[in-house]
Image (spheres, grey):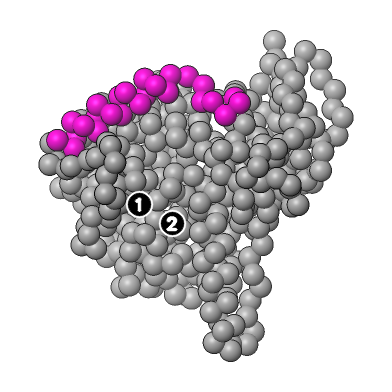
Amino acid sequence: MSQRTLIRGGTVLTLGTKTPNFPAADVLIEDDKVVEVGPALRARDAEIVDATEAIVMPGFVDTHRHAWKSLFRNFGILSSEEPDSAARHGVHYRAEDAYAATLIGLLGAIEAGITTVADWSDIQIDESYTEAVLQAHADAGLRTIFVHASPAWAETGGADATSIRHMVESGSSTPRPLTTYAVGPRKLDPPNREQEEIDWALARELGLRIHVHAGTEKSATGTVAAMFGNGMLGRDVTLIHCSNIDDDDLSAIASSGAGVSLAPAAEMAGGLGSPPIQQLIDHAIRPGLGVDNEQLAPGDIFAQMRALISVQHATLFDLKLAGKAGIPNLMSTRDVLRHATIDGARAVGLGDVTGSLEPGKQADVLILRTDRPNIYPINDPIGAVVWGMDTSNIDSVFVAGRAVVRNGILEGDSAGAQGLATSARDRVASAAGTEVTTGTGAGR
C-alpha cells in the first residue's frame, strides 16, 4: 500500500520551470515522489503536515563536501602555509574513524536542511574505507553522491581503479537506492595529462560522473579549455571551485555543459580567492553551491548563499565606485536560491531527480518556519530564505518522502553518532599531536 503525506497550507517555492510558486498551497507526496503541487489538494489516508506558517521548498543540494573532515569542524586555519590540515590528521584515520566522521558530517547536513550531498571522499585508503564511508551514507539517510578519491598523501598518482571497480560491483550486490557513485581524480593543477586520461577512461567505462578540482592555482588558466579540446570535458564532469580560469576556460565550460560547484565560504577562507560568480554569470553558467570543508566553513547552505550574493554585489559596487560603465545587474535572491537547489542538482547530474518540487521528482522537501522572531514579518519569502533564515528556522526535512527531521529534531540516534565522533576525534588528535579545546578555548 502506498504511503501518502500531504504538506498543507504553506508558501510553496517549487523552483521548477513547469510548476509555479504559490503563496499558499499543498504538496502531495506518495511513497518517494512528489505527485501534485497546488491549492486545496485532497488525499485519502494521507498523513497531514501543517505548514500554514512555513515555507515549503526543495531541500538544499550540497555539490561538494569532504564529509570525513568533520571530526575537526571549526578548527580553523593553523597557518597560511597549511590552510587545510587534513593530511596531517588523515594519515591517522582508521576505517571506523572515517565512518564516524562521515556520519556526523552528513547528519549535520540533514539538520541544516540539506537533502543531497556530493561527498568528495578523499580518505579512500583501501576498500575497507570505501565500505565504511558507504555505510555512513546509508545510515545517515540522505541522498548522496559518493565521490571516490585517493588521499592527497597517498603514493598513487590517480584514481584507485581496483577499489573503484569493487565499489561498483558492491553496489550491484548491495543496493543503495539513495547513493550514486562518481570518480574524484586529483586536481587539474598542475595538469598530468597521462594520468587524467586513465582516470577519465575508467570513469566513462563504468558510467560514473567525474568530480574534479579545477582552477585552484594561478597557473591553472587554460587547463579547462585544454580538457575541452581533448574531449575530456562534458556533461558528465563537475568542476569544483574554478577560482582561476580565463575566458577560454569559461567558453569551454559553457559549450560542454559541464557542471560547476562553488564553495564561497571555504574558497575565501582557504586561500583560493573570491568565487568567480560574475565570470560564470557572464557566460550563462549556473553553478551549484557546496560547503567543502567544515574545518574552514559553516556546514549549512544559508551561509554559502549569503557569501555568494555578497561577493557578487561587492564586486559590482567596487566597479561603480571606480566609475566604470556597463556594470552588470546585481544577482537576485531568486538566482541564489536556485544555485542552492535546482542549479546544484543539475551541476552534479541529478537535475531530473531532485532540486525542485515538481510532479514525478523525488520528494526531497524542506519546511522552514516563518513565525519566528528572527524572520517575522515575512515581506518576501525568497528574500527571507536567502538573507534572513538560518538552521533555527528548520521545522521538517524529507528525503525520498521519508521524514528525517521533524519539529526541528533529527530522527534517529544522533547521540550515538556524536559519541562515535568524539571518540574518533580524540584518538586521531592524539595520534597527530593536535591539541583540541573542549572547554573555553582562546580561538584560532
Can you tell which mark lies on residue 421? none
Q: Earlier in the sequence, mark 2 or mark 1?
A: 2
Quadrant (top left/top right/bottom left/bottom right) for the N terminus: top right
Give above or below for 313 relative to 47.
below
Q: Quadrant of residue 72?
A: top left
Let me know if residue 350 appears in the view.
no
Confirm whether the magenta stretch covers residue 424. Answer: yes
Identify the residue at horizontal 56%, vertical 84% (top origin). 321
Relative image position of residue 406 (x, y in whole percent): 59, 24
Tell which of 99 and 157 is nearer to you. Answer: 99
Identify the residue at horizontal 39%, vertical 21% (top origin). 415
Confirm whether the magenta stretch covers residue 432. Answer: no
Q: Amino acid at mark 2?
A: Ala
Relative image position of residue 391 (x, y in whole percent): 54, 40
Range of magenta residues? 406-430
Q: Which residue is mark 2?
A: 265
Q: CB of mark 2 within 8 Å of CB of mark 1?
A: yes
Tell which of 369 and 340 is nearer to you. Answer: 369
